Image (cartoon, grey):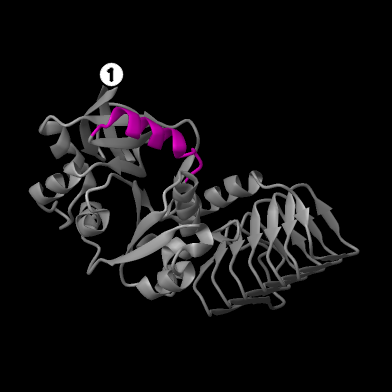
Amino acid sequence: MKGLILSGGRGTRLRPITYTSAKQLVPVANKPILYYGIEALAACGIREIGIVVGDTHQEIRDAVGDGSRFGVRVTYLQQEAPLGLAHAVLISEAFMAGEPFVMYLGDNLVREPLRPMVDRFTTDHPSAQIFLAHVPNAQEFGVAELAGDRVVRLIEKPKRPPSDLALVGVYMFDRTVFQAVKAITPSARGELEITDAIQWLIDQGHTVRPYVISGWWKDTGKLEDMLEANRIVLDGLERRVEGDIERSEIVGKVIVEPGAKIVESTVRGPAVIGKNAVIEQSYIGPFTSIGDGVVVRQSEVEHSIVLEGSSITQVSRLESSLIGRNVSIYRSDAKPKSYKLVIGDRSDVGLI
């Protein structure tokens, strides 16, 4: 069995961050989102992974390399334009060489172990198996209608959902999916939709099995979901303090990476402080990820993600924010005390 990770989207909902960075490389708990998917596939024993890439292909290649650090072999599949999930499947046909595969959306986080899903697929041999999750707002997702242990219909963002089971960004297919993606036509938005391909399989009498997950999942395409994913992942970490702590208080589940320095400050977990970061006379509150080389002085930061190389100086309170790489935020003499920001890479922001 092989793996397919889709990493070609432009990430328009996370701009301006994604003007200069692939959305799949924005970190959650100081680890790029894409890495979680690679690790999940590797944990299932999958050793051959194709990564579909687009405009940000070089950045993805530089970050992942040949996959050896994850114990896998990575092949890059160039998609000329974001023409839909089913199109990404289509261009992977030669790489799959007839083998069944797991498809994982590169900007999704799924904490449910994939191994039981893989085992069930290899035992039952359906044409497709899809991850589903109960959601309160099914009208915002692709929704599955079930009959026993079979999927009988998929509807994209229905006004009146037939169930509360939303499609999660993990799928399993055998070779018949390539017949499906060749048979369908582009949707109104000009894309080959994976829901249409799966519906074609159903309509042609192929078996599509559901797998309803009990754990959480997040599509990290929006700021609020990115921060929520960061919160959940941080909450599952174990305390580890390897940096230098001087006259400071470290409370709860906090990771302080080697080379980091915390002086006259309080860090209240769950939180992670990256390598060579400097925290001075500051408060780092729960659910905050401070990237490598970040400097925070005389400031308060909570429920936020701050990417590597940025600096925050004399900011009374920063919360629910995503700060890009090499950003400088500093305070003048005026108020207000709290800001909510999404700032792109290499910005220079003076607060007044």
- Splitting the image into 4 quarters, where does residue 124 fall? top left
Residue 116 is a magenta residue: yes
Residue 320 is situated, as x and y percent measured from the top left of the image, at: 58, 56
- Name the residue: 72% across, 65% down: 316
Would you name the residue on which mark 1 appears?
148
Q: How crowded is the residue under tag 1: few (<14 C-alpha within 10 Å), some, or many (20+)?
A: few
Left/right placement of residue 115 relative to residue 227 reads left
- Splitting the image into 4 quarters, where does residue 82 fall? bottom left
Location of residue 251 with respect to 296 vertically, above or below: above
Magenta residues span: 110-126
Q: Choose between 149 and 318: the one closer to the eye.
A: 149
- Name the residue: 87% across, 61% down: 248
Location of residue 4 with respect to 136 vertically, above or below: below
Residue 15 is situated, as x and y percent measured from the top left of the image, at: 41, 67
- Name the residue: 56% across, 60% down: 31
Q: What kind of element bears circle 1?
A: loop
Location of residue 319 with respect to 328 vertically, above or below: above
Q: Quadrant of the C terminus?
A: bottom right
Left/right placement of residue 113 relative to residue 141 reads right
Location of residue 91 with respect to 130 vertically, above or below: below
- Name the residue: 22% across, 49% down: 98
**Residue 165 makes an appearance in the image:** no
Label 1 sits on what residue type? Answer: Gly
Left/right placement of residue 103 relative to residue 302 reads left
Q: Given the current orientation, which residue lies at the most extreme right position? A: 247
Residue 85 is situated, as x and y percent measured from the top left of the image, at: 25, 53
- Splitting the image into 4 quarters, where does residue 116 fall? top left
Residue 231 is a magenta residue: no
Residue 108 is situated, as x and y percent measured from the top left of the image, at: 42, 50
Q: Choose between 132 and 4: the one closer to the eye.
A: 4
